[in-house]
Image (cartoon, rainbow, N blue to C red):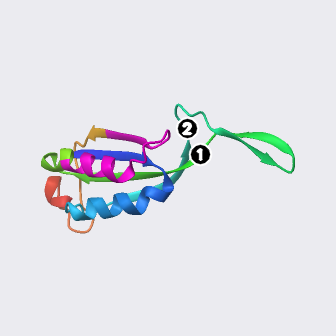
Amino acid sequence: MKLITAVVKPFKLDDVREALSEIGVSGVTVTEVKGFGRQKGHTELYRGAEYVVDFLPKAKIEVAIGDKQVETAVEAITKAANTGKIGDGKIFVTNLEQVIRIRTGETGEEAL
């Protein structure tokens, strides 16, 4: 089992959710986060004063899936979140040692 964590632009969240639903992914966790990568934020003007916005708003999507769906899910997220501009985000894939469904006590891929 794997945990896919994707950090994307907030306006791409619905596109990513729909893309994951189309490939059969049922459970998704979303968190509103702030951060920056290579773009290092940007400057804005407010009442004549220039200031730096270091942390940009992002959406963090977490999906726990079986090993067989990993490539399909990564591809779906990549296509849905891509704008071709800097700041599109990142996808991280990590191993999951154990998953337990609290309500039923199911473990492993059955709990997904």
Count neighbours of disc 1 (C-alpha within 10 A) and say few if under 14, some if 14 to 19, many if 20 or more. some
Residue at image x 14%, y 59%? 110
Q: From the viewer's perspective, tell me whether residue 99 is left or right of residue 16.
A: left
Q: Name the N-terminal-most of marks 2 and 1.
A: 2
Q: From the viewer's perspective, tell me whether residue 64 is left or right of residue 106.
A: right
Count neighbours of disc 2 (C-alpha within 10 A) and say few if under 14, some if 14 to 19, many if 20 or more. some
Q: What residue type is labelled 1?
A: Leu
Position of residue 84 measured from the top left corner of the image (x, y, whole percent):
42, 43
Q: Helix, strand or loop at disc 1?
A: strand
Q: From the viewer's perspective, tell me whether residue 63 is left or right of residue 41.
A: left
Position of residue 2 measured from the top left corner of the image (x, y, whole percent):
23, 44
* Residue indicated by mark 2: 36
Frontmost residue, 104 versus 10: 10
Give the Cα separation between the discs numbered 2 and 1.
6 Å
Q: Residue 95 carries which label?
A: none
Residue furthest out toward the right: 48
Frontmost residue, 36 versus 78: 78
Q: From the viewer's perspective, tell me whether residue 28 is left or right of residue 53.
A: left
Magenta-span inclusion, residue 29: no
Q: Quadrant of the C terminus?
A: bottom left
Q: Do the residues labelled 2 and 1 touch (CB within 8 Å)?
A: yes
Residue furthest out toward the top: 38
Position of residue 91 measured from the top left corner of the image (x, y, whole percent):
35, 41
Q: Which mark is residue 56?
A: 1
Magenta-span inclusion, residue 75: yes
Q: Using the rendered view, name the quadrant where residue 26 is placed.
A: bottom left
Frontmost residue, 44 versus 3: 44
Q: Which amino acid does label 2 sit on?
A: Phe
The magenta stretch is: 72-92
Q: Is residue 79 above or below residue 86?
A: below
